[in-house]
């Protein structure tokens, strides 16, 4: 499925390039194929650095499945992804490829790498670099990993996944865009997030309303179960986003509590 999407992506890209730009991309790929294996990553970084000068600055448009999958990529990122996949197809050490590109690339290159990790590293060999990327403080770069990206849910250990979700909330991000969050729900994540709800309420702050998506009521510890009414009522009255999320959470599992806080 992933290889098919890459083929379709290449076809879409070709439709939006001039003849000269197509020739440039073909030449770039050929250089990567012919490069000395010891120097292939250096060649990749050199070519990657010139992408924005060589291709148009445009966004995906349309409504088909492919566009939906890559809508959060800019055009230069799609080109860099195609180049990375080209190298990954023959690279004997994917972990080294990802580590090197992440280490030496600029922020736009790091972002392209992180967005495309599941295509470049479908078996999770570069997990250590992905986890390291989760510690970055640049919102654009962190979002490339944490949001609209299936890689963390597929490969991150529970501790690292939980930390990524909580950090996204600390940064004010909407975790409804965290791919497959529902498949990685766990008791520790629920309690970490509810503790953050309490902390924010006590500081008179408002966390992203999507925080409730990471909280499963049956996973809350005894103390948090006791405090559930107080803090759901507090944020229910805060804004429309929290009201909607809390309504959806309680309607399914605690309709009597929902009726009470509406009351």
Image (cartoon, rainbow, N blue to C red):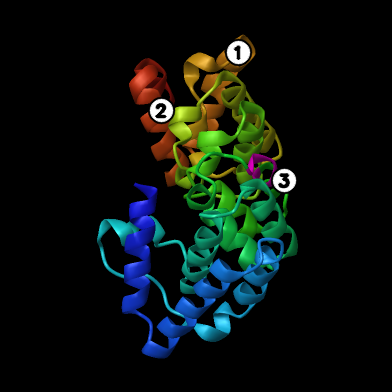
- Local packing at callout 1 (Cα closer than 10 Å; few below 14, some 14-19, many 20+) is some
Marks 3 and 2, the one that precedes in the sequence: 3
- Local packing at callout 2 (Cα closer than 10 Å; few below 14, some 14-19, many 20+) is some
The image position of residue 45, as x and y in percent, is: 66, 70
- In the image, taking residue 78 as reference, residue 259 lies left or right, namely left
- Local packing at callout 3 (Cα closer than 10 Å; few below 14, some 14-19, many 20+) is few
- In the image, taking residue 77 as reference, residue 20 lies left or right, namely left
Which residue lies at the image location 65% right of the left edge and 53% below the top edge?
A: 98
**Residue 205 appears in the figure:** no
Which residue lies at the image location 45% right of the left edge and 43% below the top edge?
A: 176
User: In the rendered view of the protein, which quadrant contains the C terminus?
Assistant: top left
**Residue 224 appears in the figure:** yes
Residue farthest to the top, as pictured: 222
The image position of residue 53, as x and y in percent, is: 57, 85
The image position of residue 71, as x and y in percent, is: 39, 62
Find disc 3 in the rendering and name its residue: 132
Marks 1 and 2, the one that precedes in the sequence: 1
Find disc 1 in the rendering and name its residue: 221
Q: Is 123 placed above or below 188 here?
A: below
Q: Secondary structure at mark 2?
A: helix
Q: Is 234 placed above or below 14 here?
A: above
Quarter of image, res 193: top right
Residue stretch in magenta: 126-130
In space, the residues marked 1 and 3 are separated at their CA atoms by 30 Å
Q: Is 141 placed above or below 173 here?
A: below
The verdict on residue 69 being magenta is no
The residue nearer to you, when weighing 136 against 20, is 20
């Amino acid at each position: 499925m992933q290889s098919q999407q890459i083929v379709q992506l290449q076809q879409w890209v070709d439709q939006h390039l001039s003849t000269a730009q197509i020739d440039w991309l073909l030449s770039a790929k050929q250089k990567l194929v012919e490069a000395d294996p010891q120097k292939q990553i250096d060649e990749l970084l050199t070519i990657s650095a010139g992408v924005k000068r060589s291709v148009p600055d445009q966004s995906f448009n349309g409504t088909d499945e492919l566009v939906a999958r890559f809508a959060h990529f800019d055009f230069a990122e799609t080109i860099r992804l195609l180049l990375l996949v080209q190298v990954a197809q023959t690279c004997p050490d994917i972990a080294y490829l990802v580590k090197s590109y992440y280490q030496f690339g600029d922020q736009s290159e790091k972002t392209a790498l992180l967005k495309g990790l599941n295509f470049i590293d479908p078996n999770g060999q570069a997990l250590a670099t992905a986890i390291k990327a989760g510690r970055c403080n640049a919102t654009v770069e962190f979002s490339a990993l944490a949001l609209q990206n299936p890689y963390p849910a597929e490969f991150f250990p529970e501790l690292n996944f939980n930390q990524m979700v909580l950090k996204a909330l600390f940064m004010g991000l909407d975790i409804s865009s965290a791919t497959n969050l529902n498949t990685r729900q766990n008791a520790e994540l629920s309690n970490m997030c509810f503790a953050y709800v309490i902390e924010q309420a006590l500081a008179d702050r408002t966390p992203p309303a999507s925080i409730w998506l990471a909280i499963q009521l049956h996973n809350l510890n005894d103390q948090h179960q006791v405090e559930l009414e107080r803090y759901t009522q507090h944020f229910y009255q805060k804004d429309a986003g929290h009201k909607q999320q809390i309504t959806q959470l309680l309607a399914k599992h605690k309709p009597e509590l929902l009726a009470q806080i509406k009351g």
